[in-house]
Amino acid sequence: MVALSSISAPASAQPQTCRPVVVFTLPGMTWADVERYRPPELMELSHAGAIASMSVRTNSARTSYASGFATIGAGARVDGGRTSGGPQAELDGNALEGSPEGDLVARLVAGGVAEIAEVAAEQGYDARAGAMADALAGTATVVAIGNSDQGSPPPAPFGRGRWAPYAAMHPDGLVDLSATDEFLLDADATAPYEIRTNTTAIEAAIDDALERCAVVVVDPGDLTRADEAAVSDPSVVRDERVQAIAAADALLGFVADRLDPLDDLLLVISPTSPWWEGEAHLGIAIARGGGFRAGETLESASTRRTGFVTLPDVAPTILEFLDVERPAEMNGRPWAARPAGESETIAGLVEENAEAVFVDSMQSRVSTGYVIFQVLVYAIAIALLASRRRKRSRGPVVGLLEGAALCVAAFPVATYLAGALDGHGLGPFWYVTPLAGIALAIAAAVTVLFRNPLDRLLVVAAGTVVTLAFDLFLGARLQIETVFGYSPIVAGRFAGIGNIAFAVLAAAALLTGTLIVHRWGGRRALVAAGLVFAGAVVLDGAPQLGSDVGGVIALVPGLGVTLVFLSGRRPGWRAVLLFAAGVAACLAVFLVIDLSRPDDSQTHLARLFEDMRSRGFGAFAETIQRKAEANLRVFRSSIWTFFVPPALGVLAWLLLRPSGRWRELAATFPKPRAGLAGGLFLAVLAFAVNDSGIVIPAVILSFLVPLALILHLSIESAAQQEAA
């Protein structure tokens, strides 16, 4: 028996022209599963439609079932609550035309909706669970089909798994039509939790839904149960999960056969990463029909990178297909089809996911190693310098410390150059070894080619700027899936310049301009430094390149103040007003450029403007609040937090010891001294406006401290030579 509960108008009241949409969910499945098990229907659809990797990240590090399905229906990142998937309210309703035997069934209200709304309000994204069903009211009925309960009846308190309603519900939890009850289940002692999805029942429910003008969300059920069971019993991965994949694949074939392959829209997605895996993964995204054709790949304005889409993009894709206006609270963007490249095959997507998972696992380890290396270098430097000052001895100390300082400054660009490597194929040891090797090679090369230590640092800094510039012009391929770049799994950014790369660009550009003025002096050198600084702003902020709003807000005044210092003046109120106007002018120019581009190419700057235009200043206030909260989270959890205090202490020692050293720098190295002052101002400003918080000044200090160390060593060496 099959039953669909209804709170919508009868089928006869639906629009004459019906364009069915089915969202077929595969919780916990990845492209690696497709390649390994080669389920026939998925394989056929992947060749018949457009494909991509799906970022399933919501606001939490791991996406729960409730969060994944609720995000589908919200068109924005939404997290489920502790009561999600639990008891549902059932209201009296009318029998449905076309339902088997016309049985009277209660209408459905999803459980825990108030908690989901409360969590969304606390997170400050203005996301609204159920926004898709609300937008489709009067156009299409939204149907939830599937039952992922952990038993029949499900054990209390967490045995229920009615996830599909969260994608199909209205904001108050009401679901237009649903088939989610226990009639969808069969007893099976060999299956996880001793139940399986009843194939006949779920197929009949899908048939019933497709007779209406409907958007149907299907949860096969068995995949979720196998995914949950595999967390505590790894043998499920080898046995029951394989059977669950086969059953889901057969059901997918049933759905695909009932849809027009050209005119109807079928979306196949993974709303969650496999829970039994220790790390988060990218999921599956397939679109067939509705303009999506074979041999294409997917992208969206959310990612602006072919081969990647996000979970919040699903609802906007459906609305665009049905010619329904997207609500302002949906920050996802519709999928678009692009010609597929070599990396957008199934094998390529499997490799992409493997690299993303590997690099994610290495980011913390590499950052920790870099921080520890710097702290050791600086501790040894202070110990040796203090000892040398007492003994007045010479030796290889200066060369070793200068080389270590150059390695510190060269390491960030080494991480981007290593983006060309196949990290997951190399493994942790052989991945880290080239990182260190590249930095050491850069330091050795500049040491051999240039005599003056500051010239060597200038070449390292300028080379870093040039590398980032070329990378941004070529699509920022060296930033995605690199340890100092960004991750498609974390999904904070898919294109442009990441937060750490912004800090690297800012610091490297500041050192480049500073050392140009020091090296050549005069007005022309000052103009050259200004051009370097202006170029950094364009690289960071232009929509086609870095598309970084916060970076522009920090760079214009930060580099502007540095340029004033380099000119030998101090910035006054006029300069402050000029820099504020410069920030506004740059953002205005970048906004005009962004708004003139196609919708699927626009960046978050244009989206913020559109949000402010529709929702007022509140959209901007929410953005500021989120950045402040992100700053606090990063401050409490990042290894970089532990680096800043010792780095500042070392910087102070190098610049102020012995007494009078700061004034001595003004006489011997006035321009680098000015650059250090400007760099500290830039670090503080960037910390205030960037949502990576303490990471930004920490990375900037990774350039400033090597500069201070080289200056200190130069003064010490000159003093010893005079004494000799």
Image (cartoon, grey):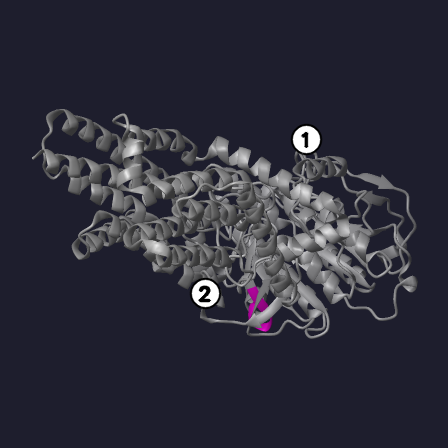
List the residue tagged with mark 1: 157
Q: Where is residue 444 in the image (x, y as percent from the top left)?
A: 19, 52
The disc labelled 2 sits on which kind of residue? Answer: Phe
Q: Residue drawn 37% across and 31% down?
A: 648
Viewer-closest of 453 and 380: 453
- Is 209 above or below relative to 81? below
Viewer can see residue 289? yes
- What's the mark number on residue 107? none
Q: Which of marks 2 and 1 is nearer the N terminus?
A: 1
List the residue tagged with mark 2: 473
Viewer-closest of 266 and 606: 606
The disc labelled 1 sits on which kind of residue? Answer: Pro
Crowding at label 2, few (<14), some or many (≥20) Cα neighbours within 10 Å? some
| Callouts 2 and 1 close, C-beta under 8 Å | no
- Is 477 above or below relative to 620? below
Q: Position of residue 419 (x, y in %)?
A: 37, 57
Dot 2: what SS? helix
2 or 1: mark nearer the eye: 2
Q: Position of residue 567 (x, y in %)?
A: 40, 48
Viewer-closest of 115 and 31: 115
The boundaries of the magenta stretch are: 45-51
